[in-house]
Image: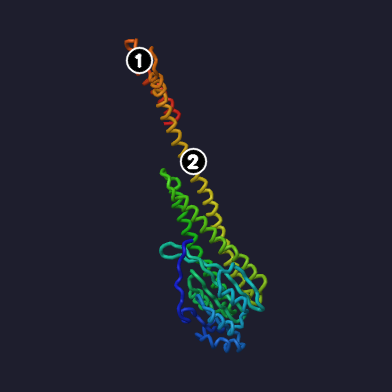
Amino acid sequence: MSPVIPVHPQTRADMVRACIHYRDGHKVADLELDAISDVLAVDDGSFVWVGLYEPDEELLHKLQEEFSLHPLAVEDALKAHQRPKIEPYGDALFIVMHTAQASANCDIGVGETHVFFGPRYLITVRHGASLPYAAARERAEQNPELFRLGPGYGLYAVLDCAVDNYFPIVEQYRQELETIEADIFDQHFKRDTIRRLYDLKRDLTTLRLAVSPLNDVLAQLTRFYPHLVRDELQVYFRDVQDHVARVAEATDTMREMLTAAMSVNLSLVAAEQGEVVKRLAGWAALLAVPTLVASWYGMNFDVMPETKARFGYPILVGGLVIAVLVLYRVLKKARWL
């Protein structure tokens, strides 16, 4: 995947994209970070959703104090470059997933989203190329009946948003593959085609490695953590799991097609080279006949056939022409010329 260079935030306001207090599925107010612990101290069933982008160490340590986050999870969220996973810390979960983003110039960037998920909070930490989760929050707010069940529905909206972002990228790869296939069967060999095939297969492998672990993450969410993911939300997480399976299947199919395309391209190149060799061999055979005769007459013999016969030289030339024409017809019929 070609890198999409993210713009790193410079201030805390740039790092904190959202800090919102929710109760009964409705937004109560935007919060300051210092007020989070006060809100969580009141056991009224409300929860807090915080969205961060490229946070620094000071900001993460601040959130660690406010939410009582596990230090190992905070360390992972700070360093990034983690494998997709789900890890329990007490009654909360730490989830890592890889994200992808397509830019306007058709470059694909990869990033990470780290999620702290507890009974009364949802924290998303984005690193690298990733679309913001404002659309996921809006979607959750538009469904208060489900959002009132807690931050679990917010987690579903985040996961679904991240997975849905893969579909345009898969479609972009499919169009690229169709273009490359047209180049493969072009009459003129293009050396760049092999490089494009290799680059596309590498990108698809990267995408597959990003998507496939999400299936296990979602399976664990719905199976082992009923205190965080309510029964009413199970069907929604299974829907995300279905989307993950569709992306994985599409990626695997295109990888298989790419392998076949590379084999076909190499076979066509070898066949084209064989045709060239056949043509060269055919022309060499045509030149071999007069060359052989000329080599005989190039030797110093006293008695030469054409020197004594009146029509010896014209007969010899005519015989050579007939022999070459017959050989040309034979090679042409055999498609060597």
Q: In which quarter of the view is residue 49 placed?
A: bottom right
Q: Nearer the viewer, residue 204 or 273?
A: 273
Labels 1 and 2: the sequence-earlier one: 2
Instruction: Give how far across and how far down residue 137 sits, in percent.
Output: 51, 76
Left or right: where 244 falls relative to 269:
right
Left or right: where 297 falls relative to 148:
left
Q: Is residue 335 visible?
A: no
For image coordinates 62% across by 79% down, the residue present is 71
At mark 2, the secondary structure is helix
Q: Is residue 211 visible?
A: yes
Q: In the rendered picture of this protein, how many numbered marks are placed on residues?
A: 2
For image coordinates 41% across by 43% down, the residue present is 187
Instruction: Give how far across and how far down residue 305 sits, in percent.
Output: 37, 13
Few, some or many residues within 10 Å of mark 1 (<14, 14–19, 20+): few
Instruction: Give how far across and how far down residue 248 sits, in percent.
Output: 56, 60
Quadrant holding the C terminus = top left
Instruction: Give how far across and how far down residue 73 sits, in percent.
Output: 61, 76
Left or right: where 244 falls relative to 275:
right
Q: Name the residue beneath numbered marker 1.
A: 315
Give the colour scheme shown.
Answer: rainbow
Query: Does 161 sit above or below residue 207?
Result: below
What amino acid is labelled 2 in the image?
Answer: Ala
For image coordinates 46% across by 59% down, the residue present is 172
Spatial distance from mark 1 to mark 2, Cα to Cα?
Answer: 43 Å
Q: Name the residue beneath numbered marker 2.
A: 270
Query: Does 272 sit above or below residue 46?
Result: above
Query: Does 136 sit above or below residue 190?
Result: below
Q: What mark, if any, has residue 292 been given in the picture?
A: none
What amino acid is labelled 1 in the image?
Answer: Ile
Few, some or many residues within 10 Å of mark 2 (<14, 14–19, 20+): few
